[in-house]
Image: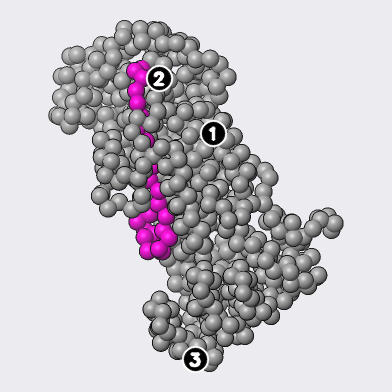
Amino acid sequence: MPATRDPIDALNDPEQWSWAARELAARGDPSALPALVEAYDMRDERSRLPLLDAMEAVGGIGAVARLAASPHGADRGLAARLAHLLPDAAHVPVLERLVVDPDPGVAAEARAALHTQVRDARWRATVERLAHAEDPGLREAALSWQRQG
Amino acid sequence: MREHAEDSASEVAASERSSSTPAAFAPLLSSRGAILTVQRSAGNRATGALLTRILARQPVTLPEVTVEGTPWKGERVKAVQRELRRLRLYSKGIDGIPGFFTEQGLTEAFGGNEWIGLSDDDLLARLQAAKRPTAGGGRQLRYGELFKDDVLDVTLGLGYLEGMTDYLTGLYSAAATGLEGLGLTSDRPAALAMLRKAGRPLANDAVGGFWVKRAAFTYAPPAGQARSIDVVVRVMANAEKKRGGDLLDAFVDAMTHGDVAWYSGHGRFGSGPDFDQDFVAVLKDADGKVLQTLDDEHVLERTLRAEGDPWMIFERRVKDGTLEMQITNAGNLWLNQKNAHPSEFGARLMYWALQHGASVATGTGGRLEKAAAGSSQGYRVLIFDGCRSQDYDRSVRATQGFGTRDADIIESVRTVGFTKDAKTQTSRVEIETFLAFLRDVMTQTSGETIVRDMNAQMKALEQGYTSDPYAFSGLGDNPSR
């Protein structure tokens, strides 16, 4: 594949995900995260492992807390999506804030992301608090997660 | 070119052709090939009388056939074939044998089954009086079959998009807006009444939304009366995740009893349409305590990869109980029994899930064959708008009722993408492509034009691709102008 081609542009073509993701991972530039997530959410069914690996390589896990603090809903939405795709114990307190985000899309994705985090002591304590949330939808979600064990 | 001997033999079994006992006639009347058999031995008038009684659900007695009829002579058939050829509805040999292609030409000439009840003289006279269409129109869909009940019945099934509920909801809204732009109105009672009149009764609480347009367009078959056709469009989406099984049932009904069934959604690694969420994976420790719950196959694969080969780890964990797969197969229409992508974790996972509770719907004795056998629909158009849906073709074609003479299929020949800038655009590429198709069918354009317009529409709005996404399958035996 031609190395001169812009790997960000190449993410639009799933045939080129492998090399584009490798190239972006090598560069380590976190500004590639939105394009990587956008490519991930394309309808194509092929493996997304290269995209996930690249997201982590460019700092996707560490970016979650920073993006979640942004005043822009798009950034917070990206934070929630990254937390969903790259589960990590560090995301839990961040997601506890995002599950009540004023943007319903962000809140929904954050709830889905929190559901998929590793269930360590901090996760369980967080979910215990959310089981008493004012929002009935959030409360019911937390209770259902607790029932799962 | 001569009509192949097997063409004739395939539509009328030898035992049927030679049968002369009264008891043999009853099963003959259950298929169109059988009707031809009766017609050949008893004549048009007798067959018409017989059909009238069948349609009216009145008892049929053999004397009516043997007394009233006059056989359809070979020379008469040749004359009919010559006229059909003149009308560009028949391109096989003038052999005097009324096979599939002769019948197809007659149905398209008259816009339905009216020809069956005509006398030989009237039939030929009507054909001779018909105006020859200009050449160069391309392969036609079998509009006479589609419109013979005066209703174009279309179902748009929107497959479940894992984790993309908002997008799916947006698709449904875009469909509503687009259909209203074509002059259709949301009207469930009117739609159900139209379908009932066309012999397709549905329950009042049938899943999905219904749009209608009365007298949406005029259909003027060359030897038949011009008439108005009503359009009913049913749109289904399982955005609430709760009705996957209902959508699957409705889609199978549309594939077998409807005129057009369109699926848009994930191709599910070539396995078949899918109207519900795939799975939830629950990772546990040796004591059964839940460690993590995952709802994305790629994240699951990556998580398992940390322990070794993902599929081997998957199988080991399932076996020792440290991975519980919560599968929902209720909305899966399993078409392709064999995994066409066995090297991919996602495909293996898909087939593993299907093998735990689903049944293959294609092939002998499958759900589709059984449903098609109970349908009066002699022809259908199917569209599979999803990644790798070309993988479906072989299995679907191997199913009785879905051969190239029974169905035309438009399928995606590559993966397909989503709408560019989906967050800012209200239109959706899947819906715009569907509407392009619907407009073309309502104006009775050729199959080639339909696919060309669908490809153009898809490429105009799709994110990321440049090559043509769709191709026709089965169009080769349709009439060609």
Identify the chain of the residue marked 1, using the numbered disc in the image: B
Marks 3/1: CA–CA distance: 58 Å
Q: Are marks 3 and 1 in contact (CB under 8 Å)?
A: no
User: SS at mark 3?
Assistant: helix
Task: Tell me which corner region of the image, top left, top right, bottom left or bottom right, holds residue B107.
Answer: top left
Q: Which residues are magenta?
A: B224-247
User: Is A60 located above or below residue B372 in the figure?
Assistant: below
Q: How many residues crowd mark 2 within 10 Å: few (<14), some (14–19), many (20+)? A: some
Identify the chain of the residue marked 3, using the numbered disc in the image: A
Please tell me whether residue B131 belongs to the stretch shown in magenta: no
Disc 1 or 2, which lies upstream in sequence?
A: 2
Residue B354 locus on image (x, y percent): 46, 61
Instruction: Name the amino acid, label 1.
Output: Ile
Is B271 in front, or is B223? B223
Instruction: Name the amino acid, label 2.
Output: Pro
Image quarter hosting the C terminus of chain A: bottom left
> What scheme was used to colour the molecule?
one colour
Label 3 sits on residue: A125
Label 1 sits on residue: B450
Q: How many residues crowd mark 1 within 10 Å: few (<14), some (14–19), many (20+)? A: many
User: Is A83 located above or below residue B206 in the figure?
Assistant: below
Residue at 67% of width from left, 79% of height from top?
Answer: A66
Give left or right: position of B278 versus B420: left
Residue B364 locus on image (x, y percent): 40, 46
User: SS at mark 1?
Assistant: helix
Image quarter hosting the N terminus of chain A: bottom right
Residue at 36% of width from left, 42% of height from top?
Answer: B185
Evaluate whether residue B337 shows in this view.
Answer: no
User: Is B139 located above or below residue A132 in the figure?
Assistant: above
Q: How many residues crowd mark 3 within 10 Å: few (<14), some (14–19), many (20+)? A: few
